[in-house]
Structures are given as structure tokens and as C-alpha cells.
Amino acid sequence: MMGCGTGAIIEPQYINQLPAIRNRLHVTVKGEIGSNAKNLRREFTQSHIEGNSTTIHVGDSREGWVKSYQTLLELSSDERFTGEVEVFVDIGDVRQAGETLNGFGGVANPVKLPGLYQRCAGILNNALGRQLNSVECCLLIDEAAVTIVAGNIRRSAGMRQFTADDELAATAKDNLWQQDENGNWRIDPERDALRMANHTRVFHRKPTLEEAIAAVRKQYYSGEGAIQWAGEAVARANCDLLTTQALKKEFLQAYDQGKAKDWLQQRYPEIDASELEHRLARFGLNPCGI
């Protein structure tokens, strides 16, 4: 939402912490972009709840856009509501396309913003009664990216990392382009936003030669199918500890066996728990994709 690249590790240990989707959202966009006078525009997003109805006044700022998006996501699991929620999104405070972005450069281009809320609500509603799956999480992030890159006013580059055994994610972009009965090619509109990011399958064990070859072959034919050996990525991102090839080899063997945390604790007992977790999660900082 801030017009920059995004990285997301969408693995079960993280997305399983998300609440289940409990509220069906009915989104209505109110007003017209730029309809409110400049001197009366809200800079930051404000929301008001009354019964099973919520009004979101989108603020005319980067923070305002982000907060409105976050608010919509949170409404889907908000326990203050019972059942269906009417969501009114007021975009009257958002500056019109072509207006200057003060302090940031360029000009505004909110052409995709009104549709963002309905597209996200559709994804959330499809998960009613359960937690979001990995591809739905990816789509929600990518819908924000679609809004930002509209009109090439801002670029957005994304990296999404999934566990190697997540078949849903591994095939998420398969047959993204399809032919109709007349032979015309079209992109699947339900998955169009997935083009905003590269997908990488993360191996927390060393991938086999056959798995590596299959990934490269898929990349050759479709441009997708990147894989990552997380052990190597974590080792490179901890070169201050793994100062010799012998230490690195030992660490990789431990990682492959699922014992990397124990290995680091034994050799570097001075490292506290939070730093240790951060160091082991650094495969998100160093893609090392194949």
C-alpha cells in the first residue's frame, strides 16, 4: 500500500495464527473521489460502528489508504458483530487523479481504490467459517499491490514464500491464462492479482536433484516454480556466526535434520531467544531462489 516492494512468508506457523472469518461483509462505496472540498478532507481514516453497520471514511494520505484496508480486513473477524455486516466506504476525501502528492513526488491515481474494498471482501467472504488459506492471504496482499501500480504511478514488486509441500500455492498460477471458445486468450479474473508477486516454495530440508530439475523445468515453460533451500539462505544471512566452511557445513547438516536451533544454542549460548528466532527466520531476507 506504500508503493514499495513487499515480502511475505506465508507458511502455516504464521497464517494459522489468523482468526477465522466469522462475518460476511457487504461493501458499498459511497461518494465520488475528490468530491469533498480540499480544506475539509480527512487526512487519516476514521470509522464509525452502529449495530451491524460500519462506515469507513478513507483518509487522503498513504496512512489513510492503509488504515482503511486494514479496517476492512479486521471487520471480517470482529466479534462485536453478529452475522452479516454492512460496510459503507466513503471515498469523498480522497484526492482526484492527477493531483500532486506533496512530499512524496508524482501525482495521485486512485482509479483502482474504489474496487479494492469489494475485491477484498469477496476473498474474505469465500473463507467464511474458517481461516484463510495461503493463496487467499497472498491474494489479499496482491490486491493492495494492484491498487498501487494502477496507471504505473507507483511500482510494486512482491515476493511470496510458501512451504514446499503447499500444493495449493505451488499450483496457484497454473493456467493463469486461458482460451475461450473463440480461441481468445484471457486471464482468470479471480487470480489476476497473483501476477503482482513471484512465488517461491521454501524447502526446510535440502531439495533433491529431481525436485530441483522439476522446478527449473517448470520455470522454463511458465516463468514460475522458484524454490529455495532455506538452510543455505539462513547460513548466508548468518555469516557473522558461520565464519568457516566447516561451521557452515555443520550448520547445514543440522538444519537439514531439523536441529538448527539446538546447534546454534549449543555453540552460541549468549544469543537470547528473540535473536535466535530472528536469525532462523532470515530465509525471508535472502531468497536464494533456484
Image (cartoon, rainbow, N blue to C red):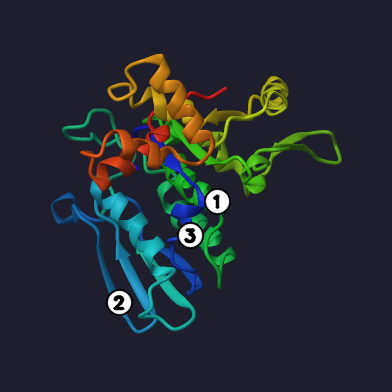
Q: Which is more toward the observer, 119 or 81?
A: 81
Which residue corresponds to mark 3?
16
N-term-proximal mark, 1 vs 2: 2
Which residue corresponds to mark 1?
134
Label 1, secondary structure: give it.
helix
Q: Callout 3: 10 Å neighbours few (<14), some, many (20+)? A: some
- Kindly identify the residue that appears in the image at 85 percent across and 37 percent down: 182
The relative height of residue 123 versus residue 24 in the rendered view (above or below) is: above
Which residue corresponds to mark 2?
49
Q: In the image, what residue type sits under mark 1?
A: Ser
N-term-proximal mark, 1 vs 3: 3
Q: Which is more toward the observer, 115 or 193?
A: 193
- Kindly identify the residue that appears in the image at 67 percent across and 46 percent down: 167
On the image, the x and y values in percent for residue 144 come to 42, 45
On the image, the x and y values in percent for residue 159 come to 47, 34
Q: In the image, what residue type sits under mark 2?
A: Ile
Label 3, secondary structure: give it.
loop
Q: Callout 1: 10 Å neighbours few (<14), some, many (20+)? A: many
Taking 127 as reference, is 271 left or right?
Answer: left
N-term-proximal mark, 2 vs 3: 3
Q: Which is more toward the observer, 201 or 259?
A: 259
Q: Is residue 130 visible?
A: yes
